[in-house]
Amino acid sequence: MARGSGSSGSYRDWEAERRRQVRAAEQARQKRERELKAQEQQRLQAEATARDAEAAARTRQLEARVEELETILRSSLRRDPQIRLASLRRRLQVPPLDLGPLAHPEPAPVWKAPAPPGWLQRAFGDAQRYETALRQAEADFAKAQADHRHRETQRQKKVIDRRRAHQQQVVEAERAVAEENARLDAIEVGLGSGDRHAVSNYMDLVLQTSPYPEGFPAERRTGYVPESSLLAVEWYLPAPEIVPEHKLYKHIKTRKTVEPTPRSIPETRQIYQRVIAQIALRTLREVFDADPGKLITTIVFNGRVRTVDPVTGQQIEPYLITMRATREQFSALVLNEPRFKPVECVRRHFHADVSPHPEELEAVEPVMPFSMADPRIVDPVDIISDIDKRPNLLELHHKEFEAFIQNLFTKMGFDTKLYQASGDGGVDCVAYDARPVASAKIIVQAKLYTKTVQPTHVRDLYGTVQHEGATKGIMITTSGYGPDSYKFASGKPLELIDGAGLLALCHEHNIPARILNRGKKRP
């Protein structure tokens, strides 16, 4: 009985120990599960935190890029756009001739005679071997001398070639430096006299050195028209894709991914319009401020983009913004005002034409084609005038000039009618565009002047356009216009073509002409 009772106690102890071990094992397993679960949660939380940080970082990059685009104008206001031509003068910088190993001749071979045999070696016949070795040594030395002379000759030829090439490099560098410095000197002299090419080249330098954000084209060109104190600027804009297509990045927790949120088309359009409006205003500021002699009173800005038509796949270059501004108009602007709105400014203050849908590459018509001011095409002053056989328009009579303008418009594809001298009500010529879709009646007035056309004539032309019920009025002169004339014409169906523009039209339609003032005064 006692034995059974003891045995039963041992079993109970064993069973209790077993259960304790089972509980301990279960507790250990649960603890491991909790630890693994906690580790998994920590891992998931760390991944989620990383995705949150990635989304925030990528969003900040987008916001920084948009901020960079939105401050193109404001960020440039402290920069002085003037170019000190003296600082651009080049100096001759040609590294000295480095011949390297060719600079020093190779050491000449040294004669080393074989050791003569002693009396004991001679006794055993080594004298013959010595003679053989001596003749071989002499032959080897002679060959070494010949090889050395050949290598030295080749070295000297290479030295001569290197020196000749270096001298040619120096001559070419001197010529390039002299040409560049002469170009800068010509620009500096021409700025003082208002030379067409000098002012154009100087303003090219001004605009080319203006720093823009990454991704902006660097192609731009200028043309100065001294007859009208006008500078035409043709600027290649960045494509609408310069605006980031995504607005922000989000962490999508259900998919455990970072995904972009697209920017709406209206927002992209508005940002891009602000970008190109800022480029235009910044260009006005830099040109007017960099003009050392106040030679420029009016600026025409044409902004175009080089891209591919998605419909045809062809390369196209539509204009997306065009405007004309006078120095007086621009002086009224406060560009650093935080509430300043670039698009509203160019549209309402300068009557600019901004593409309403630039993302669709909807083009606008430039207020003045750049070809009318391009100094490579237009150069009215011909120094070798006695050789140039092109007719000088200033030598025509008034009615001959009016007939010339009528013929020009006829060649341009218009139906024209020339009015008689008396009772024409201010109309010299009427040009009709007979196309059924774009029919138009255009009043054309021709001014054979050598002095600036007065604003009263431009106002009279506008009155005539209204009185005749015409679509548009065009005034063409052999001289130029002042800023008040351009200011009045802004936003009205008027086009002012000065002498440079007239020659550009003649050049475009293969009509020989020049404008050379020989001192004969015109009204």
Image (cartoon, helix red, strand yellow):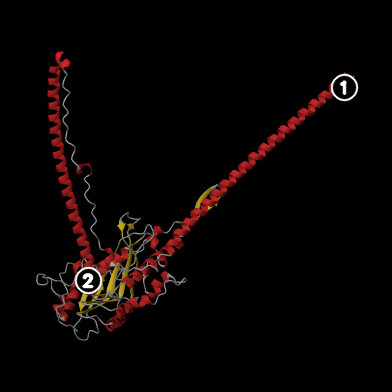
For the residue marked with disc 2, what is the amino acid? Gly
Residue 275 appears anywhere in the view: yes
Which residue appears at 22% of the width and 41% of the height?
101
Image quarter of residue 438 = bottom left
Quarter of the figure with the C terminus: bottom left
The location of residue 215, given as percent across then percent down, is 37, 57
- Give the distance between the C-alpha atoms of the residues marked 1 and 2, in whole angstroms: 128 Å
Mark 2 surroundings within 10 Å by alpha-carbon count, few (fewer than 14), some (14 through 19), many (20 or more): some
| Element type at mark 1 | helix
Q: Which of marks 1 and 2 is nearer the N terminus?
A: 1
Image quarter of residue 308 = bottom left
In the picture as drawn, the residue positioned furthest to the left comes out as 386
Q: How many labels does the image show?
A: 2
Which residue appears at 20% of the width and 58% of the height?
176
Image quarter of residue 365 = bottom left
In the picture as drawn, the residue positioned furthest to the top comes out as 124
**Circle 2 residue:** 190
| Residue 502 vertical position relative to residue 97 in the rendered view, above or below | below
The location of residue 133, given as percent across then percent down, is 15, 22
**Circle 1 residue:** 5
The label shown at residue 276 is none
